[in-house]
Amino acid sequence: MNENDELNLFVIYTAKPGMREAFLNAVKSSGILQLILDEKGCRRYEYFASVQNPDTLLLAETWENAELQKIHMTQPHMTELKAIKERYIESTEIGRMIKN
């Protein structure tokens, strides 16, 4: 991977039983989502709810490059997001992909 390549992350969250909507509401009401979208290099940050499993979410992220995504992870609002995830999310699986 070239350090200047666009970085796409696909994160599958499994919420604690019955907590998917509470997680989404907490993220939206905290203002974190808008803070992330306003970060330099953020091209996409969207949650998708599974129609097959009521506890599954997909987060699709696109960053201008890996360096800007690394900076994103150090932002103060990411500490708040981590606390929200600890309350509502059971497991996380991350896929990192580049566009060919």
Image (cartoon, helix red, strand yellow):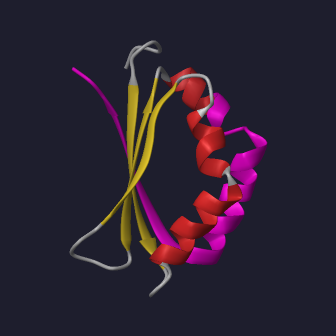
x and y, in percent, of residue 39 in the image? 63, 30
Q: Residue at x 66, y 57 (%)?
A: 81
Going by the picture, which residue comes out furthest to the front? Answer: 29
Q: Residue at x 21, y 75 (%)?
A: 52
x and y, in percent, of residue 63 in the image? 47, 28
- Seen in the picture, residue 19 relative to 58 is either above or below; the reply is below
- Seen in the picture, residue 90 relative to 67 is either above or below; the reply is below
Going by the picture, which residue comes out furthest to the right? Answer: 76
- Please give left or right for residue 67 compared with residue 2 in the image: right
Image mark count: 0
In the picture, which quadrant includes the N terminus? top left
* Residue 76 within the segment the image draws in magenta: yes
x and y, in percent, of residue 84 in the image? 66, 67
The one of 38 and 5 positioned closer to us in this rendering: 38
Q: Residue at x 45, y 86 (%)?
A: 18
Q: Write down the quadrant of residue 7 in the picture.
A: top left
Going by the picture, which residue comes out furthest to the bottom? Answer: 17
x and y, in percent, of residue 30 in the image? 69, 58
The one of 71 and 24 positioned closer to us in this rendering: 24
The one of 12 and 53 positioned closer to us in this rendering: 53
- Please give left or right for residue 15 compared with residue 53 in the image: right
In the picture, which quadrant includes the C terminus? top left
The span shown in magenta is: 71-100
* Residue 94 within the segment the image draws in magenta: yes
The one of 53 and 25 positioned closer to us in this rendering: 25
